[in-house]
Structures are given as structure tokens and as C-alpha cells.
Image: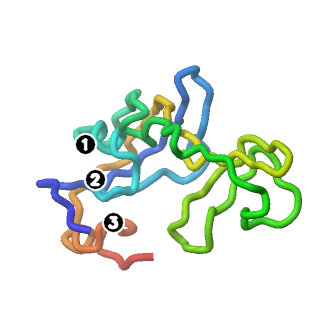
């Protein structure tokens, strides 16, 4: 992947992610921080854009609207299908997720309703339509190495090591 940013950085950060009601959806607290190459597509675009100038040690609240996170909900991604066409055995329960086909790029769908032999599936990302709020602490930010830019992702440590 060719990075089109003029001076991309490798950024390492801790975060707590909340929805618009303040409910915690995810956090790196107590675990390893996230490391990514700016513009490399490893984190949602809206967060990547808003962290571009954040220096190491900075703490900030970052608001990312749904359209710049996992997108808006698309009603056309919700469909009813016959139970017999599903690639799963046994009982199907609301909330279950599975890949809709054998191809690795087939979408992951969520069962949202079961009515007799008809099942309603939703292929929207579970966080589609959700405005996100991140509490972020930048652990470090450094210039990306030529090797990282060539590979399209961050490498461990100072960026001179090999891919894992």
C-alpha cells in the first residue's frame, strides 16, 4: 500500500472507546497500546485523521462521527433468507454471527430475527451508525522509516526491525 501522506508517523496510543451514551465499548487499559502507521488503514479513518498532529504524551478526547468510523447503517444490508440456505448447522439464535459464504472476503452477518424457517441477517458492521468517542493518550509518535512506508505498516521498536 502506497502511503500518500507527506511525512507519516508511527503512533502508539492507549484508548477508551465509548458510544454516544457514554457506554464503554472497548479499551486498551490494562493491556498493550495500539501502534499504527498514519494513513496505513490500520485504524478507522476518522481517528487517524484527528490524531495526525498529536504529540507524544498528549491526552485528548476525539469525537468520530459514524460516517468517518464504520459508516452509516445501510438498510439494504438487512435481508430475510430461508434457514436452509445458511452455512451453519443446528439452531440459529439472535445475535449469532457467521461468515455468509466460504470465500474469505464474504461478509460477516449477524442474525437479528428468526421467524419459523425465515432468518433476518444484517451485514452492517455492528458499530455502523454509531458516533464514537475516544479518550486517547499518545504514548509515542515518531517518523515512519522507509521500510515501514514500503510495507504499509509499523514495525516493532524503532521501525528498523522485521515484520512480525
Residue 114 left/right relative to 33: right
Q: Nearer the viewer, residue 159 or 110?
A: 110
Can you tell which quarter of the image residue 59 is in? top left
Spatial CA span between label 1 and label 3: 16 Å
Tag 1 and tag 3, C-beta contact below 8 Å:
no
Q: Secondary structure beneath disc 2?
A: loop
Q: Which residue is mark 1?
A: 52
Assign the C terminus to one quadrant of the image.
bottom left
Spatial CA span between label 3 and label 2: 9 Å
Spatial CA span between label 1 and label 2: 7 Å
Graded by Cα atoms within 10 Å as few (under 14), some (14 to 19) or many (20 or more), the crowding at tag 2 reads: many
Residue under the point 49% across and 33% down = 129
Q: Is residue 81 above or below residue 154?
A: above
Residue 83 % position (x, y): 78, 57
Q: Which residue is mark 2?
A: 38
Residue 107 % position (x, y): 55, 59
Q: Of the residues under marks 3 and 2, which one precedes in the sequence? A: 2
Residue 16 left/right relative to 115: left
Graded by Cα atoms within 10 Å as few (under 14), some (14 to 19) or many (20 or more), the crowding at tag 1 reads: some
Q: Secondary structure beneath disc 1?
A: loop
Q: Secondary structure beneath disc 3?
A: loop
Display colour scheme: rainbow
Q: Is residue 8 above or below residue 149?
A: above
Tag 1 and tag 2, C-beta contact below 8 Å:
yes
Q: Residue furthest left?
A: 6
Amino acid at each position: 500500500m502506497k502511503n500518500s501522506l507527506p511525512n507519516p508517523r508511527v503512533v502508539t496510543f492507549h484508548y477508551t472507546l465509548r458510544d454516544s451514551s457514554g457506554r464503554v465499548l472497548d479499551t486498551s487499559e490494562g493491556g498493550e497500546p495500539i501502534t499504527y502507521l498514519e494513513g496505513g488503514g490500520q485504524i478507522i479513518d476518522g481517528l487517524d485523521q484527528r490524531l495526525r498532529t498529536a504529540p507524544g504524551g498528549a491526552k485528548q478526547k476525539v469525537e468520530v462521527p459514524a460516517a468517518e468510523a464504520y459508516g452509516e447503517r445501510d438498510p439494504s444490508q438487512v435481508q430475510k433468507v430461508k434457514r436452509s440456505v445458511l452455512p451453519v448447522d443446528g439452531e440459529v439464535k439472535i445475535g449469532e454471527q457467521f461468515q455468509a459464504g466460504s470465500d474469505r472476503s464474504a461478509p460477516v452477518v449477524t442474525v437479528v430475527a428468526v421467524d419459523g424457517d425465515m432468518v433476518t441477517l444484517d451485514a452492517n458492521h455492528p458499530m455502523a451508525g454509531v458516533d464514537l468517542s475516544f479518550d486517547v493518550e499518545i504514548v509515542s509518535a515518531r517518523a515512519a522509516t522507509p521500510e515501514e512506508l514500503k510495507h504499509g505498516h509499523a514495525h516493532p521498536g524503532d521501525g528498523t526491525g522485521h515484520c512480525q
